[in-house]
Image (cartoon, helix red, strand yellow):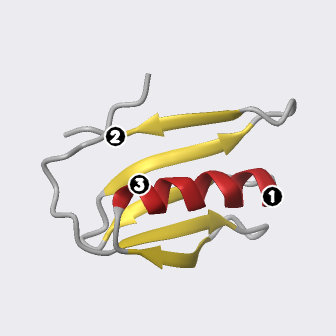
């Protein structure tokens, strides 16, 4: 079940992937959370690396990790 922190401001969201140097790299931005999550899933599947979605205030909204069998593992952070 997917739960999302809706208490945060729905301004811009950053989509970041974990690069080979273990550094977070901003890949894209989205104005809507549902678009950001959809794009993050797509990037995670295509690149096969962890991807996270952040709010502009650096609040981690979701963390997606690829599995070996191409399924995604999604963690959502609620405060």
Considering depth in this image, is 3 or 23 the residue closer to the camera? Answer: 3
Disc 1 or 2, which lies upstream in sequence?
Answer: 1
Give residue 34's mark: 3
| Residue 64 image offset from top left, x and y in percent | 58, 45
| Residue 59 image offset from top left, x and y in percent | 29, 59
Q: Residue furthest right?
A: 69
Mark 3 vs mark 1, CA separation in Å? 18 Å
Disc 3 or 1, which lies upstream in sequence?
Answer: 3
| Residue 50 image offset from top left, x and y in percent | 66, 52
Give residue 35's mark: none
Q: Give the residue displayed 31% in from the left and 75% down from the top.
A: 12
Q: Residue furthest top?
A: 1
Q: Report which residue position mark 1 lands on.
A: 46
Left/right placement of residue 27 relative to residue 20 reads: left
CA neighbours of label 1 inside 10 A, class few (<14), some (14 to 19), many (20+): few
Above or below 67: residue 36? below
Q: Report which residue position mark 2 lands on.
A: 77
Left/right placement of residue 48 relative to residue 11 reads: right
Disc 2 or 3, which lies upstream in sequence?
Answer: 3
From the image, state whether disc 2 or disc 3 is nearer to you: 3
From the image, state whether disc 3 or disc 1 is nearer to you: 3
Q: Are marks 1 and 2 in contact (CB under 8 Å)?
A: no
For the C terminus, the quadrant is top left
């Amino acid at each position: 079940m997917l739960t999302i922190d809706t208490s945060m401001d729905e301004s811009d969201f950053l989509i970041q992937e974990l690069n080979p140097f273990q550094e977070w790299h901003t890949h894209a931005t989205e104005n809507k959370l549902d678009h950001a999550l959809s794009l993050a899933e797509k990037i995670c599947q295509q690149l096969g690396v962890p991807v996270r979605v952040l709010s502009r205030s650096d609040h981690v909204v979701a963390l997606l990790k690829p599995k070996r069998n191409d399924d995604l593992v999604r963690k959502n952070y609620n405060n």
